[in-house]
């Protein structure tokens, strides 16, 4: 995590918990010449409603103004983590063990840059996947990204 995302996470997490939400991810990215601060939330078991995004935005916006962790101008967005959300942290992987995932690879493996299967393990960034009858362990340096897949 960058210094900015860590600072925003520290501000956002207690606010999300106070609203009965889970902070899923914080990203600060530059796209098409604009900086974006994106805060992703979840409500386990129920899903996220637009009113949850609005409440989180209203709670976090003044905290961001006061703490001022971002020196540049940016666009602030609060969104649901989504049904096909990326898995980035160990707790994400633990929560969705035995779920169907898609893994994007940095380099093709047997001619494929994406693999789909059932998440079977995660340890220190290495991901174990059941693809059909074959169990595959991908090393951290092979994995560009992992996301849930709706079944």
Image (spheres, rainbow, N blue to C red):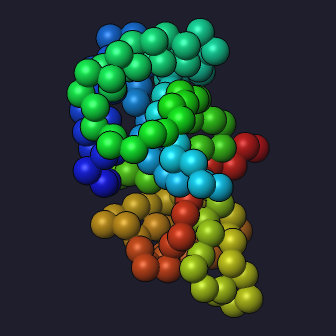
The residue shown at (45%, 12%) is 58
Comparing 121 with 144, the one in front is 144
For the question of whether residue 2 can be seen, the reply is yes
Q: Is residue 116 left or right of residue 57?
A: right
Q: Quadrant of the N terminus?
A: bottom left
Residue 59 on image: x %, y %:
39, 13
Q: Is residue 41 above or below residue 34?
A: above
Name which quarter of the figure residue 141 lies in. bottom left
Q: Is residue 130 above or below residue 86?
A: below
Comparing 103 with 2, the one in front is 2
The residue shown at (48%, 18%) is 57
Q: Is residue 135 above or below residue 146?
A: below
Q: Is residue 138 left or right of residue 31?
A: left
Residue 89 on image: x %, y %:
38, 51
Name which quarter of the figure residue 124 lies in. bottom left
Residue 78 on image: x %, y %:
53, 27
Q: Quadrant of the C terminus?
A: top right
The residue shown at (67%, 70%) is 115
For the question of whether residue 96 can be seen, the reply is no
Q: How many marks?
A: 0
Q: Is residue 96 left or right of residue 64?
A: right
Comparing 149 with 8, the one in front is 8
């Amino acid at each position: 995590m960058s210094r900015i995302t860590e600072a925003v996470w520290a501000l956002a997490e207690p606010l999300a918990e106070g609203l009965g939400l889970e902070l899923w991810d914080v990203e600060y990215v530059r796209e098409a010449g604009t900086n974006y601060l994106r805060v992703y939330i979840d409500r386990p078991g129920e899903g996220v409603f637009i009113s949850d995004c609005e409440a989180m935005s209203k709670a976090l916006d003044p905290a961001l103004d006061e703490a001022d962790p971002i020196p540049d101008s940016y666009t602030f967005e609060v969104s649901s983590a989504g049904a096909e959300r990326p898995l980035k942290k160990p707790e994400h992987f633990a929560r969705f063990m035995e779920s169907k995932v898609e893994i994007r690879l940095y380099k093709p493996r047997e001619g494929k840059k994406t693999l789909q299967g059932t998440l079977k393990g995660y340890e220190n960034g290495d991901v174990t996947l059941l693809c059909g009858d074959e169990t595959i362990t991908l090393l951290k340096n092979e994995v560009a990204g992992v996301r849930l897949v709706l079944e």
